[in-house]
Image (cartoon, rainbow, N blue to C red):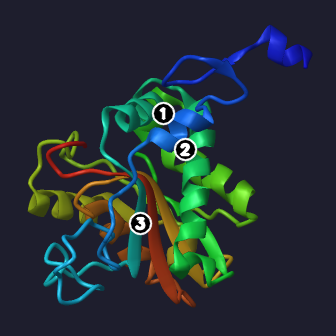
Amino acid sequence: MLISWLYPRYCELCHRQGESDLCGECAEKLKRVPLPICLHCGSPVDGGEPDAHSCARCRGRSLAFDFARSCCARTDQCLQLIYGLKYHRSNYLARPLAGLLSRLWDETPELADEENWCLVPVPSERRHLMGRGYNQAEELARLLGKMRGLPMCSPLRRLKTDAESQTHLSAGERKRNALAAYVLRSSFATGKKKLPAPCAVIVDDVYTTGATAHACARLVKKLPGVQRVGVLTVMRAGRREFA
């Protein structure tokens, strides 16, 4: 096509010209989250856990979501894609990353066996929206919704908190910061608006300690008629590895 000749596309990782911003070969090389995983929080486990639905990491914790899953483990290649989308205004990377989420959807029985889902992006703080020009989680949710034929809904709002970033916070500090950072939009809190489906999937770029996922799921579960809340992220990272 003429437009492809005038504006050629190159893979973000190998820089070869092609039809996508992430070629199939590079997408297949991205390291997946290794199995087995905890069926609740989605963290890799050693296989010796007595309860498949509650690993040592989430046992004893009150996590509001019903399950969480991530596409990729932390690698330099995945970080490059996340940083490009999140910090370098490369919003074109949202499409191939949403494609990874769509593939994960097919591989997740909790999602594939239920049809009544809507997608809820984790909201960004206003200053980040102004600097970046878009919310990366919303871009991922919007494109995933188009791929899966699912509605997107934004019942959450992000407040400004004292912590500039969660990068250097402990797990406990992250949880307290996240609980203070997210609230329901007034139209949903007052019941004027409702989710378009009884089951919701919270969409974000990275799962670190689960603090953000828990805070958002806790609020979504307060909405009338909500039956299940899952979490989907592109990357799974330890708390010392990523903000």
Alpha-carbon neighbours of circle 2 within 10 Å: few (<14), some, or many (≥20)?
Answer: many
Taking the spot 31% from the left edge, 39% from the top edge, the residue there is: 75
Residue 122 in view here: no
Residue 167 horizontal/vertical position (percent) = 18, 42
Question: Where 129 sits versus 120, above or below?
Answer: above
Q: Residue at x 57, y 76 (%)?
A: 111
Mark 2 falls on what kind of element?
helix
Mark 1, mark 3: which one is toward the viewer? 3
Sequence-first disc among 1 and 2: 1
Q: Give the amino acid at mark 2.
A: Leu
Question: Would residue 76 appear left or right of 186 to someone viewing this image?
Answer: left
Q: Amino acid at mark 1?
A: Leu
Give the percent coordinates (x, y) of residue 93.
Answer: 56, 34
Residue type highlighted by circle 3: Arg
Q: Measure the alpha-carbon separation of dots 1 and 2.
A: 9 Å
Does label 2 or label 3 sit earlier along the sequence? 3
Q: Callout 3 environment at 10 Å: few (<14), some (14 to 19), or many (20+)?
A: many
Q: Quadrant of the N terminus?
A: top right
Question: Residue at point 33% right, 66% down?
Answer: 35
State the SS at label 1. Answer: helix
Reading the image, the residue beneath label 2 is 97
Q: Position of residue 160 (x, y in %)?
A: 31, 47
Of the residues under marks 1 and 3, which one precedes in the sequence?
3
Q: From the viewer's perspective, is the residue at label 1 or at label 2 nearer?
A: 2
In terms of depth relative to the viewer, which is nearer, 156 or 100?
100
Q: In the picture shown, does residue 48 fall above or below 26?
A: below
* Residue 149 placement: quadrant: bottom right
Write down the residue under mark 3: 69
Which residue is identified by label 1? 85
